[in-house]
Amino acid sequence: MRNKSQAPYILNRDGVFYYVRRIPQDVRKHYDRHRLYFSLRTKSSATAARAARSISQKLDDYWMVLRLEQMALPKASLIQPPTILEGHGPTLSEAKELYLRLKGNGKGKVFIRGAERNTQYLTEVAGDKPVDTYTSQDAARFRDWMLERGMTVVTVKRVFATIRSIINLAIGEHGLDCKNAFSGVYMPDDDGQQKRKPIPLENIRSIQAVCRETDDDLRWLVALISDTGMRLAEGAGLAVDDLKLDGEIPYVDIKPHPWRPLKTKTSTRKVPLVGASLWAAKRIKATASGPFAFPRYTDGKETNANSASAALNKWLKSYAKGCVVHSFRHSLRDRLRAVQCPKDITDRLGGWTVGGVGDGYGDGYPTDVLHGWMSKLVSVVLSRTDPGGSDDATFHTSSEII
């Protein structure tokens, strides 16, 4: 139902705002319908109003162009041809190849596919032209095109980040005196975007109990992640030798491999193994028949983290509604907060970016210091879910095994 106090052409249906507008009769032949109707992908009336005004202005301008095309212009011979921008930089495709050559080494197929896909999107909208000839209008059209295709604002921002990086590198390498047209582009609020939830402590306890009961390779992967906060790809791409169990303090050595690079430089780290993660590491070591901890997902050439994500997230829904495997990382952050772990140690354990020049000096925290905080983390799970720490604690079980 339309609210008269809102901007024109806005319709609120089930809390989500839509753009609805009749197409004028004199330009209707260019369409296969009589009105425009599409979601603005927001529940915010202010955001919807801004988006509707922007869309309306663009439509009015476009329709004016269509009307002028149907008019006979007087003194047409006196009209100057449009100015064609002559670029001095590489084309977008050339800039992409430069980007992959300089920054793609060791990044893996996901990085390469992202650059290829995102530049192809831009080429469809604005063409493959010199990077210094793209305009802010091109960037705005590109944003609107992606939103109209149903991409979320988060996805659009991610695509823009890749395009900005490609063009910034080309500008720097070729010494171009121009602005990156894809910087500072307005992005609408994404009020409908759900924040990823951490897994509650009691659910973590139940999940870990089920992993011990089922005792197969997939549950080892879940258990390993549950008390380390590793990213799924980091866990799925481990070598058996990355699990260090012979020393006084057992730990997992998370480092890049040819078959599985890491997301960032700070992702390289050593995380002490405690609780369910230590149990899982021992089971992997005891049953290993090859070099890979999870040969189901790693073959020495690549790690298929997407396949692991699809299988494990489906299984996890029975135990933690609205959560996914990556939610264990959010939980790790909360669990370390609960034991008042210093932020810089938390960042080291999770492989999150650390700030400040001083953080790059030295070898970092000793393993025994990290182990002390990880041990406290596990004790919180035990004390808050099962005061006695008994193995006979009641937990949710499911017959659905993957």
Image (cartoon, rainbow, N blue to C red):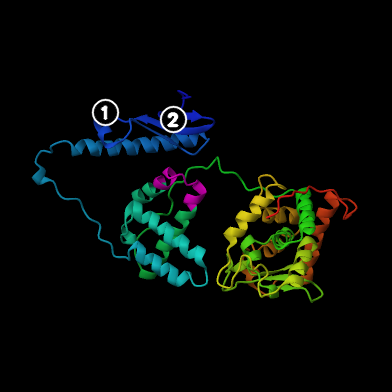
Span of residues in magenta: 144-157
Q: What amino acid does circle 1 point to?
A: Gln
Q: Mark 2 points at which residue?
A: 10
Q: What amino acid does circle 2 point to?
A: Ile
The chief SS type of the magenta part is helix
Q: How crowded is mark 1: few (under 14 residues within 10 Å), some or many (20 or more)?
A: few
Place residue 169 in its image quadrant.
Answer: bottom left
Is disc 2 placed on a helix, strand or loop? Answer: strand
Residue 381 vs residue 304, the one in the foreground: 304
Left/right placement of residue 158 relative to residue 254 reads left
Alpha carbon separation for disc pair 2 and 1: 21 Å
Q: Name the residue under label 1.
A: 25
Residue 66 vs residue 134, the one in the foreground: 66
Residue 340 visible in the snapshot: no
Q: How crowded is mark 2: few (under 14 residues within 10 Å), some or many (20 or more)?
A: many
Residue in the image at 55% along x and 40% along y: 192
